[in-house]
Structures are given as structure tokens and as C-alpha cells.
Image (tube, rainbow, N blue to C red):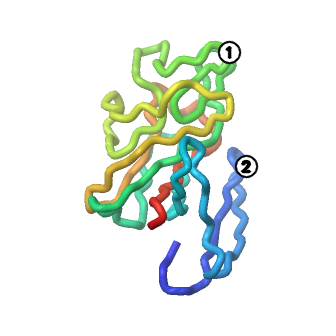
Amino acid sequence: MRAGGGWIVVAVVASGCGRIGFATVPPDSSPVLADAFDDTMFTALETLVVPVDGSSVSSVAVLSSSGTYRLRASGVITCGGVGDQMGDAEYHDFTNPTDNNSLNGLDYGISIDSPVVGQKTIHWGAYTPTHVYEVDYVGRDQVVSANLHDGQYTDNSGTFMVTVLQQTP
């Protein structure tokens, strides 16, 4: 999203099908999302499409250390392994949700600013059947990056979304 009154182009990626759709949003109708966890209002700043092959994706926006941010992770992928072979930002096998990979004990899920698999520094919270999670994030005057930590990537398909939300003044 850009400040300055220009039109905004929003890309929507349908999980798992590889298709992208575009919509334009007039500058006077910037999307403002009510935070699902409290009454504070946040504005969607940018959405990252997180690949499920372990590679990292970074924001374009630099997140200021003086800003207040939230990260919203969403999406369900096919991730192989045991159980129902489904996964979200933090858990896999929805019939018996766990955030540990049963093959190697690895902390499964989307990692923020920690690209080395096995060093996941974020926990998205308790399992939810909506598969939408939010965490507070402190900007560090740099971009934010996201990648999936998993023990096996070749059996994964689909995509995750991480939306960077900025507190509305």
C-alpha cells in the first residue's frame, strides 16, 4: 500500500491453485481491518505470499521501530507427513494438531525473521480451526521476512499469507 493518494492494486492469491486476481481500491477507501483480538484498529500495510518450499519472502515496507504492528498469518496447505497431511501457520495434522514435526522434532510453521530452519523464534498461539493467527510485532527499521519451517518441503503444496498490519493513528 502506498501513501500519497494514488490508486492501490491489491493482489489476491488463491491458496494452492497458483492464480492471482487483482482489484483496485480507490485512495479514499484504504482497507482498515478491525483487530480480531481487541478493539484497536489496524490498517493493512502489505501482504506477503509465503512459499511452502522453505524459501524466504521479504516485505517491501521497512517497519519503523517507532511503529506498532501486527502480523496476521492465514492459509492451509498440504504438507504431507502423518495424519491428515494438512498444515497452517503453526500446526499440522488438524485431527491431532501439533507444532512439532514428528519426523525430526522441528518446530513446524511460519517463521518471521529467522530463516535458518530449526531456529523458529515466533509462536502464533493456540490452535484455531479458522487457521488465522495474529501476533504483535516490533519493527526494527528494516523489512520483515517470512518462511516456512518444515522437515520436508517436496510434499508441500499451496501458499500462506502474512499480512503486515500497522496501527492506525
Few, some or many residues within 10 Å of mark 2 (<14, 14–19, 20+): few
Q: Nearer the viewer, residue 58 or 61?
A: 61
Circle 1: residue type: Thr
Apparent side of residue 116 relative to residue 24 in the rendered image (left or right): left
Q: Earlier in the sequence, mark 2 or mark 1?
A: 2
Which quadrant of the rendered structure holds the C terminus? Answer: bottom left
Q: Position of residue 34 (x, y in %)?
A: 60, 54
The structure residue drawn at horizontal position 65% and vertical position 22%, both measured from the top left corner, is: 85
Which residue bears the numbered disc 2? Answer: 17
Residue 84 found in image quarter: top right
Q: Position of residue 166 (x, y in %)?
A: 45, 60
Residue 20 found in image quarter: bottom right
Q: Position of residue 6 (x, y in %)?
A: 57, 86
Which residue bears the numbered disc 1? Answer: 95
Q: Position of residue 56 (x, y in %)?
A: 41, 49
Apparent side of residue 69 relative to residue 65 in the rendered image (left or right): right
**Structural distance between the alpha carbons of marks 2 and 1:** 24 Å
Few, some or many residues within 10 Å of mark 1 (<14, 14–19, 20+): few
The structure residue drawn at horizontal position 55% and vertical position 33%, both measured from the top left corner, is: 154
Q: Nearer the viewer, residue 155 or 162?
A: 162
- Most distant residue in the bottom direction: 5
Say if 162 sits above or below 77 in the image: below
Apparent side of residue 108 relative to residue 139 in the rendered image (left or right): right
Label 1 near label 2: C-beta < 8 Å? no
